[in-house]
Image (cartoon, rainbow, N blue to C red):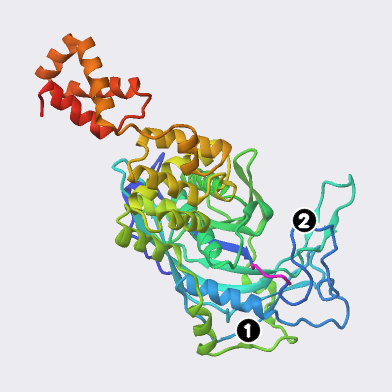
Amino acid sequence: MSIIDTRTPDAKRLVPGATGDWEIVIGMEVHAQVTSEAKLFSGASTSFGAEPNSNVSLVDAAMPGMLPVINEECVRQAIRTGLGLKAKINHKSVFDRKNYFYPDLPQGYQISQYKQPIVGEGMVTISVGPDRQGQFEDVEVGIERLHLEQDAGKSIHDQHPTLSYVDLNRSGVALMEIVSKPDMRSSDEAKAYLTKLRTIVRYLGTCDGNMDEGSMRADVNVSVRRPGEGFGTRCEIKNVNSIRFVGQAIEYEARRQIAILEDGGKIDQETRLFDPNKGETRSMRSKEEAHDYRYFPDPDLLPLEFDQAYVDALAKDLTELPDDKKDRLVNSLGLSAYDASILVSEKAIADYYEKVASGRDGKTAANWVINDLLGALNKAGKGIEEAPVSPEQIGAVIDLIKEGTISGKIAKDLFEIVWNEGGDPRQLVESRGMKQVTDTGAIEKAVDEIIAANPDKVEQAKAKPTLAGWFVGQVMKATGGKANPQAVNDLVKAKLGIE
């Protein structure tokens, strides 16, 4: 496979070294566990957190005479993911045996796809930023392929001083290996790519993306070169299980390689591990090439074939993807690209927002969801699924503002009450006397009292009209924030005789 360089060196992404600038080149192989009740070639459960070796069939344990049978739902999930990556779906693919010895791989080989994967080339668009001017830059990252393969089991080395334990629950679980092209040029781009990939598979429901449970992990290929030169020798950092760690691993590895090259050394192609406690990578083994695995078609499995009608039926039922949803929110509801990006970052947030925005002003709904709800969730360390305020409750608060029943300030107080105590916003406004004062007679009385008590401020405001805001603030304070701000503003200006 020839690698095509798709990027022009960009000065703002170059890394300064002692002898000049360097460019980082990054590609990624992401292993995403397929969301499915059963494993790729057996009926054993894929549930996380089960007792060790309790989700293991005779096929997973590689007992003599046991034959693999493909799980069609895993095939469907791979096709859905390929469609979400705007990739070519191959109507014929082949399963191969990838031969290597490992204690938690009972067969002595892994069933994977080598030369004929189920999904071919595709594209993911990532957004990097904001920069100092608050601007975002879209970058296209090519997808080389997506193939299906079995996961291995798990070796556990910290349960006994001299023995290692093996848990085969994960053995045979279906993985999608999503291979990018070497199109990324910074750790920020790599983090944005992995974030976007996780968002896509979560929207599609093809992988839960829970990196802390191991259901999504990344092998990161890093090399460095002088701007304009050919690709350098890459090192692969295996099994990185957090987006933050991916960024740290790239930064360290790039610096390590630059230091070696500037000292006149050369980079050895190898597999490395990232130690998050030390913030550094360390050598694991020399990097294997394809011929080391002695690939050959699995004789127990026929080629996997389906027609375009099969693909079209799956495409018809696909959910709206994040890029399409973002475009709709910007074009139909008038949101900024930044606000729309926040709202589509998780499907649950997007779904929540759309319920709030239904029949209401989209921008107002976005401000409440982003600033008030997500701000409060972030402060409380909670996810959107744990929100104590429902979309209907926020919607009711927005409606009360629009009707003039409460002011924006009262609405903030009302949100706090609903967050902490729950309840129907309309009933709370009634029972707690939170309605704003719209009676102009009562507001006028408060305005007159403030003006009479501050003759010196009156003269200053007439000379400098912007000081009218001070009177508005005093009236709002005197009425406990319940006066209609617009009515107060109009009356203050009229009484002071300023425009």
Residue beneath disc 2? 49
How many numbered callouts? 2
Question: What is the secondary structure assignment of the residue under circle 1?
Answer: loop
Q: Can you say whether 27 is above or below 306 in the image?
A: above
In percent of width and height, residue 463 lies at 9, 17
Dot 1 amino acid type: Val
Residue range (magenta): 34-38
Identify the residue at image location x=54%, y=44%: 248
Residue 400 point in image, percent of width and height:
39, 44
Q: Which SS class for mark 2? A: loop
Q: Is residue 250 left or right of residue 439?
A: right
Q: Note whether residue 1 is visible.
A: no
CB atoms at circles 2 and 1 under 8 Å apart? no
Q: Residue at x 13, y 21 (%)?
A: 496
Front-most of residues 236 and 344: 344
Front-most of 333 and 17?
333
| In the rendered image, the vertical position of residue 90 relative to residue 225, given as above or below | below
**Image quadrant where residue 79 sits:** bottom right
Crowd tier of the residue under label 1, counting other residues whose Cα lies within 10 Å: few below 14, some 14–19, many 20 or above:
many
**Is residue 454 inside the magenta stretch?**
no
Kindly report the distance in space between the C-alpha atoms of the residues bearing marks 2 and 1.
Answer: 32 Å
Q: Is residue 457 above or below residue 385?
A: above
Q: Main secondary structure of the magenta part?
A: loop
Q: Position of residue 486 (x, y in %)?
A: 24, 34
Neighbour tally class for label 2: few under 14, some 14-19, many 20 plus, Cα within 10 Å: few
* Mark number displayed over residue 495: none
**Screen quadrant of the C terminus:** top left
Please report whichever mark, 2 or 1, sits nearer to the chain's N-terminal start: 2
Q: Left or right of 394: which side holds 155? A: right
Left or right relative to 247: residue 209? right
Tag 1 residue: 94
**Along the viewing direction, whichever of 239 and 84 lies nearer the viewer:** 84
